[in-house]
Image (cartoon, rainbow, N blue to C red):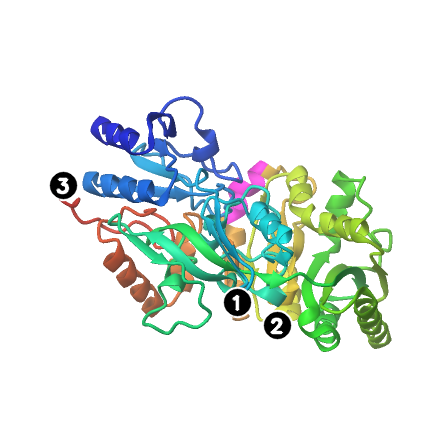
Amino acid sequence: MSTLIDTLRRIVGAPHVLTDGDLSAWELDWRRRERGKALAVVRPGNTGEVAAVVRACAAAGTAIVPQGGNTGLAVGSTPDLSGTQVVLSLTRMAAVRALDRDNLTMTVEAGCILQNVQDAADKAGLLFPLSLAAEGSCTIGGNLGTNAGGTQVVRYGNARDLCLGLEVVTPQGEVWNGLKGLRKDNTGYDLRNLFIGSEGTLGIITAATLKLYPKPAAQLTAWAAVPSMEHAVALLGLAHQHLGAGLTGFEVMGRFALGLVHKHMPQLRVPFIDQEDVPYGVLLENSDSESEDHARARFEALLETAFEAGCVTDAVVAENLTQAHNLWHIRESIPLAQAEEGLNIKHDISVPISRIPAFVEYADAMMAREIPGVRLVNFGHLGDGNLHYNVQAPVDGDPKVFLREQEENVNHLVYEAVAQFGGSFSAEHGIGALKVDKLEKYQSPTALAMMRAIKAALDPQGIMNPGRVLGTAPAMPAAPAN
């Protein structure tokens, strides 16, 4: 492999091929549950270098693990333990290539941090609406590779819906430039959507043309106390009726989840946490294109109707941006508070919104029956049907022992319930290496056969992020050197 390492050093420069020292930033997954061993970490500076690196690895038959900010939650961007895989880090490719105000698009390189994309749009007086907790670290290439969701999917959609074009390096080291920025382009198969969500198993996204939006004239945030999940879903329906496209966020948070924030982060003032009869909190966001007065009037009309219908028992509307940020900070602190409580079993599920109340009732009762004392950290993006139905050890249990002994059983119970209610076991985090066996179980044989055919056609050597999504397939011999 020394010949390959020498070749990679010639391509990107010796300082950008890392083989020694502490490589944990690239070899350790975000949740610190899995650690691999890379042959090398290679950091190309442009698309041409990416293509040359891929050609060199293909000639050597060496697997490549594409990596952005390494913030994924399904172990999809860290190497295995073999020490034979090249981690291809795109963080040096962080430029904003172009911003077209008239076309409402921005073209950025894959290593651009999401928050920097948001800031670039903001400086131009525009909005890039993808927003998630890791936005200060995750990169746009990773967001697209996993089809990230976040808190504004209810209005703007997933990462897939915010992308108009891609630049991709194929497993053979060729470059496909699809950065046209067109909203209508029916010229054959939609290659863009093939690569989005493929988690680096079909090619390497090196740049993207993204949709931008006019900034709203006003943005209001409210926190509502609701008496049940059924009432939360009813409130969502009223919000759609009253706010229309202005509804940009709708998050639900169970009392135990909020109680963890209150316990571990007492400086954050959780609304209504002292009211024992409030099982759920809902965080709503309304963006208005007219004025703050108009937005507030619509918000107040919604809440008045919701009070009359019994969907809401108490509510507070943020008076300024600082208060709004504080409310969102509480929501975004739930995963951190849960980590403070101890290791836990995480789920990223989606269920048809109309069936979520029945699912939660069934799953809560089933978990309490099967594992007495278990604590359920239920929160998520109710507006698009995505819940993070996480499971914490009983209060007197050892979290490490609970995780080791119960994870597979808990996953089986939750995923079986999700399937029973017509849902998905992976809503926005992807499959990675963590859920390969679950895809085999819950995806249809026909769908799996089509996926494998696509993988075999585009990556016959099997060098692109092997072991992810579809597991490890038999690889073809390495391509002969030119």
Residue 238 in percent (x, y) is at 74, 75
Q: Are marks 2 and 1 in contact (CB under 8 Å)?
A: yes
Of tags 3 and 2, which is closer to the observer? 3
Residue 402 at x, y = what percent?
Answer: 57, 42
Type of residue at label 3?
A: Ala
In magenta segment, residue 202:
no
Q: Which residue is mark 3?
A: 481
Disc 3/disc 2 C-alpha distance (Å) = 55 Å
Residue 410 got which mark? none
Residue in the foreground of this view, choosing between 439 and 61 = 61
Q: Amino acid at mark 1?
A: Gly
If you read the primary sequence from the N terminus, does the residue marked by circle 2 or circle 1 appear first?
2
Residue highlighted by disc 1: 423
Q: Residue at x 44, y 37 (%)?
A: 92
Is 369 rendered above or below residue 290? Answer: above
Residue 355: mark: 2
Above or below, 449 relative to 2: below
| Bounds of the magenta segment | 400-407
Q: Quadrant of residue 255?
A: bottom right
Query: In the rendering, at what x and y percent does residue 348 appear?
Result: 55, 56
Asked whether residue 430 appears in the rendered view, the answer is: no
Which quarter shows the N terminus?
Answer: top left
Q: Which image quarter holds the C terminus?
A: top left
Q: Secondary structure at mark 1?
A: loop
